[in-house]
Image (cartoon, rainbow, N blue to C red):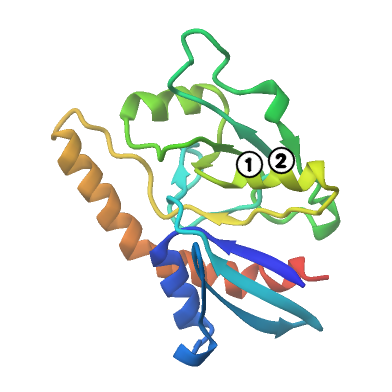
Amino acid sequence: MIGISIATTWEFDATIAYFHVSPEERITYPYGEYFTREMNGKTLLFYSTGVRKVNGIDPRYDILDIIVPDRAVQYDCTVKEIEPLIKPSFVVNLDVSKYGNDFHLGTIGTADRAVVMWRDYIELQDNGLTIADTEAGAVAYICQKNAVECIIIKGISDFPTEEKNEGAVEANAEQMRIYIENTPKVMRRIFDDYLHRFLM
């Protein structure tokens, strides 16, 4: 069995729609819901985690680009004045070379909060992050400690919005609007173009 973690409610809703999951197939558990599908002779368990969304960080990429990180790190913006932003003991290198080289690689950073402050976004850019979320780096770390393969496939639905021309609340609301609009498109790209190739 292969577990596929789906982060936000919007991403899980898009997944439910993509796979035409009936109400009877949706099973609840303490943190959300899950359902299963058979693909390439393997059982896939898609489960919702209810965590926060991914943010695009590296400006070389565009909205709707899909990233398959080959490095996962954890960072903490709250103690960066006294500790390194990137925690060296939580860096995980992910070997995805056996799946080809025709996809975007990069570094995903994970923290306990979404990137909503412009200054955090700039600092993550300065530290070489490609994308950021609130769970993938921790999952990769636990998988590494337990010798379980971990593949992260993330799509960029939005980038943080600079707050200089509008208030922080308005900037965040616009960022969320763009995210919700683009989420079904990103999930469709992941499932159409990436899922099968990683089920070798």
Residue furthest front as drawn: 30
Check disc 2: other Cα within 10 Å, few if <14, some if 14-19, many if 20+.
Answer: many
Q: Where, quadrant-wise, is the N terminus in this rendering?
A: bottom right
Q: Position of residue 50 (x, y in %)?
A: 45, 58
Q: Is residue 191 above or below residue 145?
A: below
- Which quarter of the figure has residue 166? top left
Give x and y (percent) for residue 144. 79, 43
The Cα–Cα distance between marks 1 and 2, rounded to whole angstroms, is 5 Å
Residue at x 28% of width, y 52% of height: 176
Q: Which amino acid does label 2 sit on?
A: Tyr
Q: Is residue 139 above or below residue 110?
A: below
Labels 1 and 2 touching (C-beta < 8 A): yes
Which residue has dot 2 on it? 141
Quarter holding residue 185: bottom left
Residue 15 place in picture, x, y as percent: 50, 74
Q: Quadrant of residue 171?
A: top left
- Going by the image, does 167 lie left or right of 61? left
Does residue 69 appear in the picture of this structure? yes
Q: Is residue 1 above or below residue 5?
A: below
Which amino acid type is shown beneath numbered disc 1? Ala
Q: Give residue 40's position: percent from left, percent from top.
A: 79, 82
Q: Nearer the viewer, residue 91 or 96?
A: 91
Which quarter of the figure is the C terminus placed in?
A: bottom right
